[in-house]
Image (cartoon, rainbow, N blue to C red):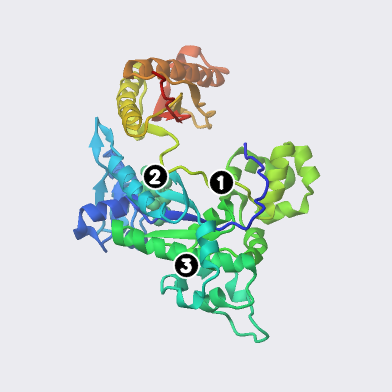
């Protein structure tokens, strides 16, 4: 459930930094002969050439898309270089990508509070650095990189009495800028510089969104890619949200978004503006109602968390097409493989960071073989995490069997139970360890 946090009382400058076609860049750094050539990274699984999980920008120009399998991608782009993710214990080993992400985090964290949001995404709160810069003469500080920033709504911004359109550098340095816009310009200069430092020190390009809160920063980081940055001044928020489909806001992508569309006919974030806070609270509860009212106005009080380490560890595998798992024995075999990888990462986290995880969750994708109608979702289940491969297997098996029982019960209407229970197929399985905390010091 989204949390309606109070809007911050002080003007903040927040960036969302997202690495471009991340796994492809990691592979191109390992194999420099692939630089500048159409490249995609495929999942460990040879069925139909494996699934593309990352597609480089040269390959995108040839029509390669992430949803394609390797064979189909080669058909649209015969020069495509396909690189398979490294493999360990018969499954993808993502450690090189995680470590590469950590290198980037180490550089980015120099400029402000840094939250690692995923393997290749980081939020930065650069308010303090922007405030320090704000007393300086920006005209001497706007780098070439900063002056190529995109500013949402800029073409509509008219400056002075003339109707001349404003360039980015002029917008940064204009003497009558509001305090908000001035700090945003300072943030953009800082983020442009640190993106260049990331490139120099890691060889990776990244894109960024710079705004006054996390929601707007995240929305804008993908607007201009690769290797570019986008700013959202407050004056542009209303028009930006007016036509933005609600599914683009992370927390509105699922059930809540469907309810808004079904019950209120809301399709864009701007459509929410017509409802009072009271009405939204009546329908969705006080917290979610206020959060929706704020979101419609681009208000978001979420803090950037001081967290450069991952929030959870996962180990998963997909079993597409004919590789789907159809017996409990094969599921347990793979639970053991996944548990081994998970335990390795838990051990690493404990020894390197003195942290332990406390919750185990199993996610699975399951369907009923030869069923035309959509099956209910195979529900994820959690329980307190116990360390040790055998214990993780025992606990995850218990959770899997509970979910499978529920799943099959939904299917049984009008069918023989034996027919249903023998016809399920698992196409994805993953284990996640979360609720990670610092291990308390033991007093001696
Ligand atoms: P994304 O940031 O979603 O995409 P990207 O970095 O490849 O490309 P873009 O420039 O458009 O941001 O994902 C980051 C990495 O996570 C991606 O390189 C590969 C991996 N990934 C998967 O393994 N499976 C998936 O379904 C997705 C979406 C990503």
Of label 3 and label 1, which has the lower sequence position? Answer: 3
> What residue is at 49 percent from the left and 78 percent from the top?
139
Residue 266 appears in view: no
Relative horizontal placement of residue 247, taking residue 4 as reference (left or right) = left
Q: What residue is pinned by disc 3?
A: 189
- Cα–Cα span, label 2 and label 1: 17 Å
The disc label shown at residue 250, or none: 1
- Mark before the other along the chain sequence, 2 or 1: 2
Report if residue 348 is visible in the image: yes
Residue 120 at what x, y percent from top left?
40, 49
Alpha carbon separation for disc pair 3 and 1: 27 Å
Q: For residue 184, which quarter of the picture? A: bottom right
Quadrant placement of the C terminus:
top left
Relative to 122, residue 319 above or below: above
Front of the two marks 3 and 1: 3
Residue 328, compared with residue 231, is above or below; it is above
Q: Regarding mark 1 in the picture, which secondary structure is present there? A: helix
Q: Name the residue under label 2.
A: 119
């Amino acid at each position: 459930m989204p949390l309606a946090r109070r809007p911050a009382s002080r003007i903040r400058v927040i960036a969302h930094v997202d690495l471009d076609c991340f796994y492809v860049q990691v592979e191109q750094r390992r194999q420099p002969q692939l630089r500048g050539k159409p490249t995609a990274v495929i999942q460990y699984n040879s069925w139909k050439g494996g699934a593309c999980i990352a597609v480089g920008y040269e390959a995108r120009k040839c029509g390669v898309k992430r949803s394609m399998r390797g064979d189909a991608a080669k058909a649209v782009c015969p020069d495509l270089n396909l690189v398979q993710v490294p493999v360990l214990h018969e499954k993808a080993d993502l450690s090189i990508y995680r470590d590469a992400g950590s290198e980037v985090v180490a550089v980015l964290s120099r400029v402000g509070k840094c939250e690692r949001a995923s393997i290749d995404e980081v939020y930065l709160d650069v308010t303090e650095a922007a405030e320090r810069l704000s007393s300086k003469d920006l005209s001497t500080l706007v780098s070439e990189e900063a002056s190529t920033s995109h500013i949402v709504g800029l073409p509509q911004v008219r400056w002075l009495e003339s109707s001349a359109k404003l360039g980015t550098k002029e917008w940064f340095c204009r003497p009558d800028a509001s305090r908000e816009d001035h700090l945003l310009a300072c943030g953009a200069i800082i983020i442009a510089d640190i993106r260049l430092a990331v490139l120099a020190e890691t060889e990776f390009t990244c894109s960024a969104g710079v705004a006054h809160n996390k929601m707007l920063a995240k929305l804008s980081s993908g607007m201009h890619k690769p290797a570019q940055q986008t700013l959202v001044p407050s004056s542009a928020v209303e028009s930006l949200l007016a036509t933005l489909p609600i599914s683009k806001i992370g927390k509105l992508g699922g059930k809540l978004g469907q309810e808004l569309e079904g019950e209120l006919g809301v399709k864009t974030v701007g459509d929410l503006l017509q409802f009072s806070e009271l009405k939204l609270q009546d329908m969705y509860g006080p917290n979610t109602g206020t959060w929706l009212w704020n979101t419609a106005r681009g208000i978001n009080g979420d803090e950037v968390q001081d967290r450069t380490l991952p929030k959870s560890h996962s180990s998963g595998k997909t079993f597409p097409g004919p590789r789907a798992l159809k017996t409990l024995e094969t599921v347990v075999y793979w639970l053991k493989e996944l548990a081994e990888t998970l335990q390795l990462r838990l051990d690493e986290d404990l020894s390197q960071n003195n942290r332990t995880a406390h919750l185990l969750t199993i996610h699975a994708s399951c369907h009923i073989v030869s069923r035309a109608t959509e099956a209910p979702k195979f529900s994820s289940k959690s329980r307190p995490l116990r360390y040790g491969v055998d214990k993780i297997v025992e606990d995850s098996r218990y959770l899997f069997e509970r979910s499978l029982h529920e799943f099959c019960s939904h299917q049984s209407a009008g069918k023989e139970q034996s027919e249903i229970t023998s016809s399920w197929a698992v196409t994805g399985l993953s284990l996640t360890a979360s609720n990670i905390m610092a291990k308390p010091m033991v007093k001696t």
